Amino acid sequence: MNQEAKQELYRAGEFASRAGVSVRALHHYDRLGLLKPGGRTAAGYRLYHSGDFARLQQIVTLKFIGFPLREIKRLLAGADLAAALQLQARTLEQKRGQLDQAVAAITKAQRVLAARGRLDWRVFTTIIEAIQMQTNNDWTKKYYDDEAQKLLAERRQHWTPEFQARIQKQWARLLQDIEQAAEKEIDPGSRTGQSIARRHGKLIEAFTGGHMAIRRGLAKQWEDRTNWPPEFQKRVMPTERGGAFLKAALSTHWTGKYFDARARKALAKGPGLTSPEVQAHWKKLREDVEKAAREKADPAGPKGRALARRHAEIVQQVSGGDQSVIRGLKRIWEDRRNNPHETLSDAGAKFLEAMLKAAAKN
């Protein structure tokens, strides 16, 4: 007699009762192919084996932690459960943050009611809009790695609905001022242009908290901006003309911060720090340095020397060999933690410094 024949058989009602689920749920799992009955009676009633309890327990467990049934079917068929659990944990952490925000909104409303005897619905509506905005931003998760997701979850615990609403208003006002400045053809290097650049940097910093992992994710998100949901594009992305003004204002801001008059004059003769060609070279170099750091390559080895040569070529392209420009580039590097657009990780920065030091000895 085989093992299956030895197992006790249960009709659907008894099996459901013992398992703590409804018969309707069993029928639904059967239709989806999640849990097929082991057999049927002569009258056509479903029969389940005692061994089916283990399968049902897996289904109920995965369903409890939030997986949809079709995803559960894929996981039980052999998909990467570890990766799925990790992603689900991040999703639940974000939902927990949203629930915390909702509780905070209710608490705020209770305080207002207790103090005034009535609720200012305009304030409450603003809080709700902030929560909804955060909820609708789940599509951005793909841009942030595990480290960034963890940091963002920690930061969201301190982002009150009021704070979220205030930041949203500041972004809206900034976009409005960018468009007005572009329309009036204001000089990006003027006091107005530089004020806009500083406000932009502060808002970026408010989101990233200075964490390089979050900055990297934000950079990936920005590079893919043409694929953002249309409503999000309208809310945070300037027009083509406004974007050109902001880019020029930011370039002038960082150039003025790190380069003296002589260096700025020399930079004007070359491609500039923000030209697409230079930015593409820097981006590729950063990626390859990060990869070399992850692989624990020897900074003084062939890979390190090749990366150092590429670094020198980019510096030469930007500076034209002018020492005042090179000094400015060094200032940027030394102050990278205060630059909201720098994304190189600590490990990558350490590898870059080691490879340049090794190259300088040769």
Image (spheres, grey):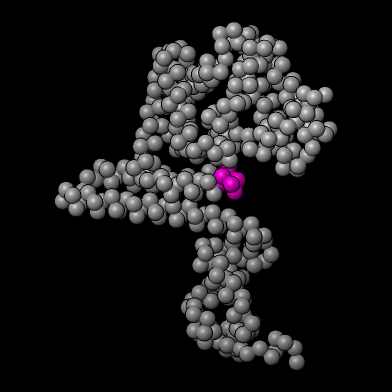
49 in relation to 170, above or below:
below
Query: Can residue 45 be seen here?
Result: no
In percent of the image, x 56 and y 44: which residue is there? 148
Q: Which quarter of the figure has residue 180? A: top left
Instruction: Please provide percent x and percent y for residue 214.
Output: 55, 40
Quarter of the picture holding the C terminus: top right
In percent of the image, x 74 and y 27: which residue is there? 356
79 in relation to 26, above or below:
above
Q: Which quarter of the figure has residue 84? A: bottom right
| Magenta span includes 362 | no
Residue numbers of the magenta segment: 143-149
60 in relation to 281, above or below:
below
Instruction: Please provide percent x and percent y for residue 141.
Output: 55, 46
In percent of the image, x 58 and y 83: which residue is there? 46
Query: Can residue 116 be seen here?
Result: yes
In percent of the image, x 43 and y 22: which residue is there? 196
Q: How many marks?
A: 0
Instruction: Determine the residue located farthest toward the front in the rendered image.
Output: 361
Instruction: Please provide percent x and percent y for residue 114.
Output: 19, 53
Instruction: Please provide percent x and percent y for residue 273.
Output: 61, 19
Residue 87 falls left or right of residue 239: right
Quarter of the picture holding the N terminus: bottom right
Instruction: Determine the main secondary structure of the stretch shown in magenta.
Output: helix
